Image: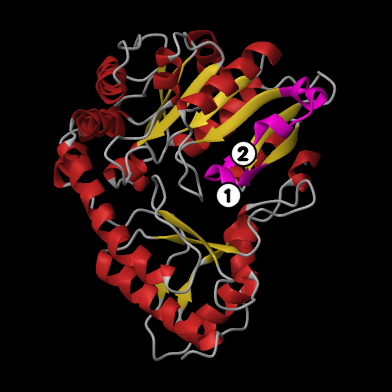
């Protein structure tokens, strides 16, 4: 067997299952999970119809490059969403089966494990696919801790030069999971300068870009490059319909950016078997063309977060994020308690599931930046999220002797 598999760590939800082992939650409460970041809003009917109207596509093998119609729809969306010149659908866009598999396989494409000391840099806390794809590509991860004083942005200025010289790939996540933070144009300017100096590829994970709480939508990597007068050299952006359109089961997304990298990525995916079903492609075209359902979806999240966040602020150190559908909360506002103990007792006593922040991060530079925090995914309808928040308030006040 591949010995690199032994380097993979248990997924956060495996750790959560172990944490909850042997616990029977109080049956007086129905279960509510804020643990998994899986959209729960209904899938738009027009996307369902597009799926059933295109079943004839099942009779054909799909091309890895995807259809002209899909790449064209994505190019149009990128132009309209970010105000950039329309990317070349033939060379600068590639459909993928969701951003998760593309993040993993791009790492296998980019990393040269024959170069001594190959590193992949990523934020900490982070989406665990970054780490797993690194190990299986024969490289090692280097974690840059998020800094609450910098709106949870990693402080790249603290990275030594000898580390930068070994970095082949940098993962950024904007809006971030779990913090919801969005990179600024100044952040991008710094990253591009570092990429130019050291030659690494930037993989910009933007799967949460269409859920936001400010008037201006989040800045994207391709948009930042154009605003700074750059082309897309050494930049690949990832996007997905899962959160934007509430279709995680379709596994539909795209990568866009540096044509030279995408040419090699297409070669890799041709052998890997990464072609998207023609049925999914047809429905994806319709989804990328429509913005009405996206604005409706955003409005739901704005309503939800505007009601839940003030409630939780009574007992937790938490603020409305820039974007995404998570609240990233510090748990010791009223009482000294660890994130794992908070999650375990909340589940046992109030049947609410949250994810300990330490499970989403690694010990790096003497600290686990997720310790003492929890991630709450507000993906259900507003009534369920409000009920969960009310239980969390009652639980925390009880811990503090106020209940």
For residue 154, the mark is 2
Q: Nearer the viewer, mark 1 or mark 2?
A: 1
Residue 27 appears in the rendering = yes
Within 10 Å of disc 1 (Cα), the crowding (few <14, some 14-19, many 20+) is few
Vertical order, 49 against 229 (above or below):
below
User: In the figure, is residue 189 to the left or right of 386?
Assistant: right
Image-quadrant location for residue 85: top left
Image-quadrant location for residue 13: bottom right
* Segment colored magenta: 145-167
Query: SS for tag 1?
Result: helix
Which sits in the foreground, 53 or 373? 373
Which sits in the foreground, 364 or 96? 364
Q: What residue is disc 1 on?
A: 148
Magenta-drawn stretch contains 153? yes
- Percent position of residue 122, x then y: 64, 36
- Percent position of residue 197, x then y: 68, 12
Vertical order, 126 against 401 (above or below):
above
**Pointers 1 and 2 in contact (CB under 8 A)?**
no
Which sits in the foreground, 89 or 383? 383
Q: Measuring 44% from the left and 40% from the top, which residue is drawn there?
A: 175
Vertical order, 304 against 365 (above or below):
below
Q: Please identify the residue farthest to the right as the structure is shown.
A: 116
């Amino acid at each position: 067997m591949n010995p690199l598999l032994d380097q993979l760590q248990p997924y956060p939800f495996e750790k959560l299952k172990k944490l909850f082992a042997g616990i029977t939650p109080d049956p007086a409460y129905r279960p509510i999970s804020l643990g998994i970041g899986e959209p729960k809003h209904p899938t738009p009917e027009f996307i369902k119809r597009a799926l059933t109207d295109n079943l004839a596509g099942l009779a054909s093998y799909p091309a890895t490059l995807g259809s002209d119609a899909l790449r064209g729809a994505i190019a149009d969306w990128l132009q309209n969403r970010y105000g950039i010149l329309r990317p070349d659908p033939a060379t600068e866009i590639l459909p993928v089966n969701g951003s998760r598999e593309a993040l993993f396989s791009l790492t296998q494409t980019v990393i040269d494990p024959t170069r001594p000391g190959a590193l992949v840099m990523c934020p900490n806390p982070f989406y665990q696919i970054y780490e797993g794809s690194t190990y299986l590509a024969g490289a090692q991860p280097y974690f840059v801790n998020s800094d609450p004083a910098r709106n949870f942005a990693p402080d790249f200025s603290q990275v030594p030069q000898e580390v930068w010289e070994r970095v082949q790939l940098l993962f950024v996540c904007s809006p971030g999971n779990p913090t919801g933070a969005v990179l600024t144009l100044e952040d991008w300017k710094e990253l591009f300068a570092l990429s130019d100096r050291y030659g690494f590829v930037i993989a910009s994970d933007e799967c949460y870009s269409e859920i936001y709480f400010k008037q201006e939508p989040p800045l994207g990597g391709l948009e930042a490059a154009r605003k700074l007068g750059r082309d897309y050299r050494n930049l690949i952006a990832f996007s997905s319909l899962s959160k934007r359109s509430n279709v995680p089961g379709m596994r539909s997304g795209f990568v866009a950016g540096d044509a030279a990298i995408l040419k090699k990525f297409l070669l890799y995916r041709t052998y890997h078997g990464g072609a998207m079903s023609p049925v999914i492609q047809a429905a994806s075209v319709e989804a990328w063309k429509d913005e009405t359902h996206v604005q409706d979806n955003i409005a739901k999240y704005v309503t939800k977060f505007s009601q839940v966040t003030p409630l939780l602020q009574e007992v937790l150190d938490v603020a409305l994020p820039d974007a995404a559908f998570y609240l990233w909360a510090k748990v010791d506002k009223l009482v000294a308690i660890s994130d794992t103990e908070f999650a375990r007792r909340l589940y046992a006593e109030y049947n609410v599931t949250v994810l300990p922040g330490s499970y989403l991060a690694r010990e790096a530079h003497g600290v686990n930046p997720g310790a003492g925090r929890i991630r709450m995914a507000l993906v259900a309808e507003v009534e369920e999220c409000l009920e969960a928040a009310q239980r969390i308030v009652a639980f925390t006040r009880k811990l503090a002797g106020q209940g």
